[in-house]
Image (cartoon, helix red, strand yellow):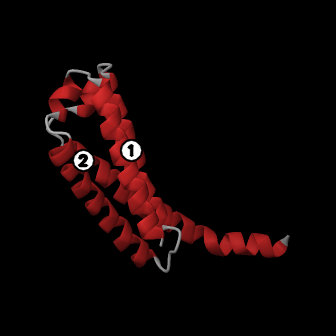
């Protein structure tokens, strides 16, 4: 039992460092997306707009998956930080491409609470996020 406690004592500070770092990158990614989005998604969610809630929920999960994948093969705090930051930037870029090429006019449709197209958009974002996460995990 003693080696387990020694292992915990030695690894716990690193756990906290990794957790804080990826949490900051994750929250920054969410804020960046909200800032880049042409409509006020959080306000729409608070007003009961189901389409905005679906879309924002997919965003929350989609940004977390590649960041979590960065923690699988971690070599150092610096390594995870670089990969997590790169994954968020790449994810935001891919979201914009998806919004522009595949689903034009989605901000207006989300504002009108059209859940059908929003569900498909959310599925595209989640699928892309899974592919990115597995590509990062190797």
Q: Earlier in the sequence, mark 1 or mark 2?
A: 2
Q: Secondary structure at mark 1?
A: helix
> Marks 1/2: CA distance?
10 Å
Furthest residue toward front:
102
- Any part of residue 36 in sight: no
Q: Residue at x 46, y 64 (%)?
A: 134
Seen from the viewer's position, the closer of residues 76 and 135 is 135
Q: Residue at x 31, y 48 (%)?
A: 30
Q: Nearer the viewer, residue 136 or 46?
A: 136
Residue 50: x and y in percent read: 34, 23
Q: Is residue 1 left or right of residue 82?
A: right
In the rendered image, the vertical position of residue 83 relative to residue 66, given as above or below = below
Residue position marked by numbered label 2 in the rendering: 33
In the image, residue 33 lies at what x, y percent? 24, 47
Residue identified by numbered label 1: 60
Residue at 48% x, 69% y: name it: 137
Q: Quadrant of residue 124?
A: top left
């Amino acid at each position: 039992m003693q080696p387990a406690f020694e292992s915990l004592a030695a690894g716990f500070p690193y756990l906290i460092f990794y957790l804080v770092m990826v949490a900051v990158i994750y929250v920054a990614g969410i804020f960046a997306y909200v800032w880049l989005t042409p409509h006020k998604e959080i306000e729409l969610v608070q007003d009961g707009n189901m389409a905005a809630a679906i879309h924002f929920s997919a965003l929350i999960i989609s940004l977390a998956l590649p960041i979590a994948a960065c923690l699988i093969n971690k070599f150092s705090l610096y390594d995870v930080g670089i990969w997590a930051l790169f994954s968020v930037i790449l994810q935001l870029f891919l979201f914009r491409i998806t919004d522009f090429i595949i689903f034009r006019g989605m901000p207006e449709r989300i504002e009108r609470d059209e859940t059908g197209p929003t569900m498909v958009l959310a599925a595209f974002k989640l699928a892309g996020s899974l592919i990115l996460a597995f590509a990062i995990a190797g």
